[in-house]
């Protein structure tokens, strides 16, 4: 698939299964590492979570939720523990914000977002499905600590990767005229 076709046809895939071969994962991560980066700070890093790491992440999610709200039901905690099982591989994109006189924090976070976007498009170009997920656990201090993040780091998102399963949602039509103004 060529680059423009991948960009024009990329779609989030919520139902993922199967495997992600290491060669594909390497291509996806390499694409992420080509994100725009003012000052060449490399203000990001990527955590790869697969196999038993998904179980540990699910336990971390449940513990974090129980700490913030001890009135969780067994069913609610089980649902949180199962979230990382929705894909065979999860890439956690982390923004590493450093003080810099010419590159404000917002640019560093945007650069990490571009890492995530590049990886989504690369996965699609390779025939894999992907979903960029955030939500409450993305911003939970206990999850951040459990994943080994430093004080200057923030999770930008969890990129779920795998083989597409089931019917895919159709892409909505997006009109250039609805979103572009010539000045």
Image (cartoon, rainbow, N blue to C red):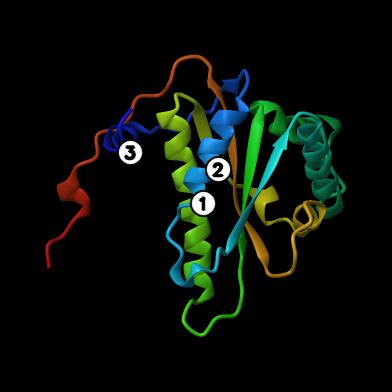
Give the residue pinned by disc 3: 7
User: CA separation, marks 2 and 3?
Assistant: 17 Å
Mark identifier at residue 159: none
Q: Total of numbered circles in the picture?
A: 3
52 sits to left or right of 10: right
Residue furthest left as drawn = 182
In the current view of this chain or complex, which residue is farthest to the front?
A: 23
Mark 2 highlights which residue? 29
Tell me where residue 167 sits by quadrant. top left
Q: Could you say which is closer to the camera, residue 71 or residue 39?
A: 39
Give the CA distance from mark 1 to mark 2: 6 Å
The picture places residue 72, in percent across and down from the top left corner, at 83, 41
Q: Residue 106 at what x, y percent from top left? A: 50, 70
Give the x, y percent position of residue 89: 65, 32
Side (left or right) of 103 relative to 95: left
Label at residue 33: 1
Q: Is tag 2's residue or tag 3's residue first in the polypeptide sequence? A: 3
Residue 101 relative to residue 86: left or right: left
Question: Contact (CB < 8 A) between labels 1 and 2?
Answer: yes
| x 60%, y 25%: residue | 20
Q: Residues within 10 Å of mark 3 (few under 14, many from 20)?
A: some
Front residue of 30 and 178? 30
Q: Residue 104, relative to residue 168: is it above or below?
A: below
Q: In the drawing, does residue 66 fall left or right of residue 99?
A: right
């Amino acid at each position: 698939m060529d680059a423009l076709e991948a960009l024009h046809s990329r779609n989030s895939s919520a139902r993922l299964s199967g495997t992600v071969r290491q060669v594909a994962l390497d291509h996806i991560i390499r694409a992420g590492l080509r994100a725009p980066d003012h000052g060449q700070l490399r203000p990001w890093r990527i955590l790869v979570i697969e196999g038993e790491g998904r179980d540990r992440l699910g336990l971390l999610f449940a513990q974090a939720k129980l700490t913030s709200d001890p009135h969780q039901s067994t069913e609610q905690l089980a649902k949180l523990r199962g979230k990382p099982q929705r894909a065979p591989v999860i890439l956690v994109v982390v923004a590493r914000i450093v003080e810099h006189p010419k590159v404000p924090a917002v640019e560093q976070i945007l650069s990490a977002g571009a890492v995530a976007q590049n990886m989504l498009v690369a996965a699609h170009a390779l025939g894999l499905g992907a979903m960029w997920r955030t939500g409450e656990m993305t911003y939970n201090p206990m999850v951040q600590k459990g994943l080994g993040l430093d004080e200057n780091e923030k999770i930008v998102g969890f990129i779920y990767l795998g083989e597409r399963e089931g019917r895919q949602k159709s892409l909505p039509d997006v009109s250039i005229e609805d979103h572009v103004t010539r000045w």
